[in-house]
């Protein structure tokens, strides 16, 4: 949505459902479908996702190495992993511990091609 905010459609049992449904359908057609069309193309997604606002911080360094690996760029995947490991070195929070677990499994199953 252009407002970049949460939008809610209320379907009340006493309201005019057709009008609410029409507004929702219009919003999906106007904003949702172009978004889906753009990001559902793998080449577009893999080329643009790193510089977009699609990825939250807690998934960025899981998704980006995976995208690189799917594209066959194992060096980039490993470099991204090394950068995040360096950034979180010594940290004991849930993200850092979970990331180290992810890396161990990712390297064992994906980067050992």
Image (spheres, grey):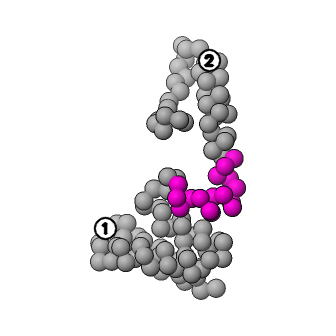
Height in image: 89 above or below 16?
Answer: below
Residue stretch in magenta: 37-52
Ranked by sequence position, the earlier of labels 1 and 2 is 2
Height in image: 103 above or below 18?
Answer: below
Answer with left or right where residue 81 lies relative to residue 74.
left
Query: Which residue has dot 1 on it?
Result: 93
Res 37 seen here: yes
Answer with left or right where residue 92 lies relative to residue 61.
left
Query: What is the crowding at mark 2: few (fewer than 14 residues within 10 Å), some, or many (at least 20)?
Result: few
Query: What is the crowding at mark 1: few (fewer than 14 residues within 10 Å), some, or many (at least 20)?
Result: few
Separation of marks 1 and 2 at Cα, in angstroms: 48 Å
Magenta span contains residue 46: yes
Residue 45 percent across, percent down from the top left? 63, 58
Task: Name the residue nearer the viewer: 33 or 106.
Answer: 33
Query: Which residue has dot 2 on it?
Result: 19
Q: Quadrant of the C terminus?
A: bottom right
Answer with left or right where residue 62 lies relative to residue 93.
right
Main secondary structure of the magenta stretch = helix
Identify the element where label 1 is drawn: loop
Res 100 seen here: no
């Amino acid at each position: 949505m252009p407002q970049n905010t949460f939008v809610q459609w209320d379907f009340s049992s006493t309201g005019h459902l057709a009008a609410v449904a029409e507004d929702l359908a219009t919003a999906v057609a106007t904003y949702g479908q172009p978004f889906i069309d753009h990001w559902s193309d793998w080449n577009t997604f893999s080329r643009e996702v790193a510089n977009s606002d699609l990825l939250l911080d807690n998934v960025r360094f899981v998704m980006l190495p995976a995208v690189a690996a799917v594209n066959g760029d194992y060096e980039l995947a490993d470099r991204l992993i090394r950068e995040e490991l360096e950034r979180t070195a010594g940290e004991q929070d849930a993200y850092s511990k979970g990331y180290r677990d992810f890396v161990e499994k990712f390297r064992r199953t994906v980067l050992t091609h």
